[in-house]
Each structure stands twice: as structure tokens, then as C-alpha cells.
Amino acid sequence: MSESPGAAISLASAPPAEESPEASSAPRPVRPSEAGPSGAGSSEVERPGDDGTAPRPPAAQRVLPLRRPGRWIATAIVLVLVAQIVHGLVTNPFYQWDRFQYWFLRPTILDGLLITLEVTAYSAVLGLLGGILIALGRLSRSPVLRAVSWTYTWLFRSVPLIVVLLFLYNFSALYKTLSLGVPFGPAFFTFDESRLATDIVVAVVGLSLNEAAYASEVVRSGILAVDQGQHEAASALGLPKGYQFTRIVFPQALRSITPNYVNLLINLIKSTSLVFYVSLLDLFGSVQSMGSTYPGDIVPLLLVATVWYLVLTSAVSVVQFYVERYFSRGATRILPPTPLQKSRTALRDLRARARREAAI
């Protein structure tokens, strides 16, 4: 059935439907302007706002947070103790902060700092590479490799680092020359050990040998932390063992290796202070040398060494955060926020809370 043009009626122009007696007898919500002088009806009925938002509960129905007086008392005690420590550091003349400022950037101190960084960098790289090799030996199917790797780890974790350094420093007394050639046969190249083993070489070798023993256990635990299904899936694909380790197993193991190895790296930075006993003037050696020359500045010089070690370990901790954040991709749904992102979020939450408090 066709309709003539203009016969269709729109909803906007349609006449309103008649209200039923039941609908007309329903109570109509009371508006604030229709309420009585005493405001009756304003608190009994919750009404949406003019903009359609949810109604705001009355002040009497607000949920108050649980008060924790113990937390506030502990916070006050800690703040008082921190304030006393800072006040003692600033006002005690025994620290000689003017001499601290004088020594902090002296060329002698900076030269020792560069030696500390150099020894740490070489020892960290060589120690990690040695730790990876020893860890692979511990996980090998060869009983000889497993026994040798275990013996190495057991030996260097048992002997103090200072003993290792002193033993290497006097190594020329046992072996005056070193040679390369056929085992138990003729030698092709011969080296004078006293010329080859300089102070920095002795320090790097001793720290690397000690670091590799601890790093091997860190790497081994990281490899064992990788799910066994990853190994089985890589083997099912027919991938070579080297490719499985470098592209599948080791990148996943780094998530567990990184925080533990950074602890070793921080300990390595502090352990470089022992190379002073093998005649290498690192940061601590420079401080000790200047303290012997200027006995009145021993405390400021020790504070200089303390602050520089704090700077180095703090820089390593910052790098650790971003390395862990990088390797956590794919393992977590949301990456950990950076300190700048945390500050922005805290500031935004503080502003939103202030707005809510002001609106109530």
C-alpha cells in the first residue's frame, strides 16, 4: 500500500500520547525549588545532576579512612632522627666541609677515580664473560667440564679477594717466565712475567677471576629460571644449540641475571679499593696517599671517597632500572613507570584529590 507524499508523520510532530490514570497518579520527584522552607525531600531522594552525572552523597554518608596513629608516630620519629643526623653533619666542625670541597675535584682524586672506573669496567666485562663460560661448563653433559667448573667456583668463592691479589702480585716469584707452545713440549713464545704483569693487569686479573666465580652462579641460576618449554620448543624447531642459547634462552635469562649481577657490579666497585695493596693508586689509594701527606685532612678525604663511591653506585642503580625495564618487555603487561612518570602521576593524583576536597 503506497502513501501519498506528505502523509508520513515524524516522531517530533506526533501528538503526545494520553497518560494513563496510573501514570498521572505516580508521585512526581520533588525539585529543590519546590521543596518547603525546611528543605524536606532534599535529603530523602537522590537526584542526578543537571548534567546527567551521578548524584553526590551527602556529607554525612562519606566514608572516612581508617586512622592509623602508629604510622604517624613512626613517621615523626624517623623525621626527627633524620633531622638530627643532617644537623650533626652540617654543624659539626670535625667534618671540615671546606676541606672536603677543596679535595673533591682535585686532579689527584680524579686520576684515582679514572683508575677505579677503568679497573671496574675491564673486570666487569671479563668477569661476566668468564661467568658465562663457567656456567655453561656447570650445565654441560661432560663430567670433566662440570667438575672443573665446580672446582673453580668453589676455590675462588672460598679464598678472600685480598689473598688472590697478593698472590698474583708475587706471582713472578713462582714463575719468572710464561711461554706458549706445545703442551709438555717446546715453547714458541716466551714472556717475562715481571714486565707483563703490571699493577693494573694484576688488579684486573685478580678482580676478574674472583668476579667470574660469583657471576657463574648468577648466570646459571638465570638460565635455570627459563621455562623448560622454551628449551623444548627451540629443540623441536631444529635450531642449533648456539642459536638457541644466544637468541632464545639467554635473552630470557637476562631478566633474572640483571638485578643479581648488578649487585655483584656494585660490590666490584667497592672491591677496587683493595687494589691499593698491590701498589695501584685508585680512588681509595689516592685518598690514603693524600691522608698520609696531610694527616689533618683524613676525615674530609674519607668523606670525598665516600661521596664518589655513592655517586658511582647510584649511577649503576639508575642503569640497572632501565636495563630491567628494557628486558621486562613481553613479560609484563605494563612496563614499570620511570621516576619522572611516577612524579607526574603523583602530582596529578594530588591535584585531583584537592579538587575533590574542594568540591565537597
Image: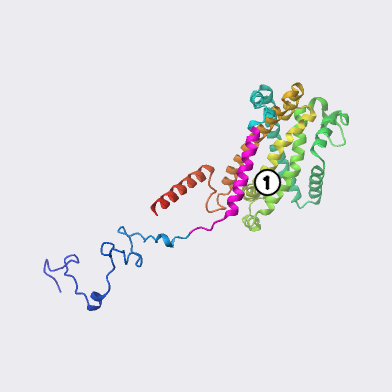
Instruction: Name which quarter of the figure residue 310 lies in.
Output: top right
Residue 29 point in image, percent of width and height: 29, 68
The quadrant the N terminus occupies is bottom left
Task: Name the residue furthest front.
Answer: 38
Q: Amino acid at mark 1?
A: Asn
Tell me which segment is drawn in magenta. 64-89
Image-based side of 27 in relation to 296, left or right:
left
Q: Residue placed at 71% from the left, 49% from the top?
A: 220
Residue 113, image x, y percentages: 68, 28
Label 1: which secondary element: helix
Left or right: residue 12 versus residue 138 is: left
Tell me which residue sits at (78%, 31%) in the image: 202
Image point (83%, 36%), residue name? 163
Identify which residue, 31 or 241, lies in the foreground: 31
Residue 192 visible in the shown view = no
Query: Residue 35, how many percent across, how many down?
Result: 28, 65
Q: Please, is residue 25 above or below residue 287 in the view?
A: below
Q: For mark 1, what is the residue?
A: 260
Q: State yes or no: residue 9 in magenta.
A: no
Asked whether residue 220 appears in the rendered view, the answer is yes
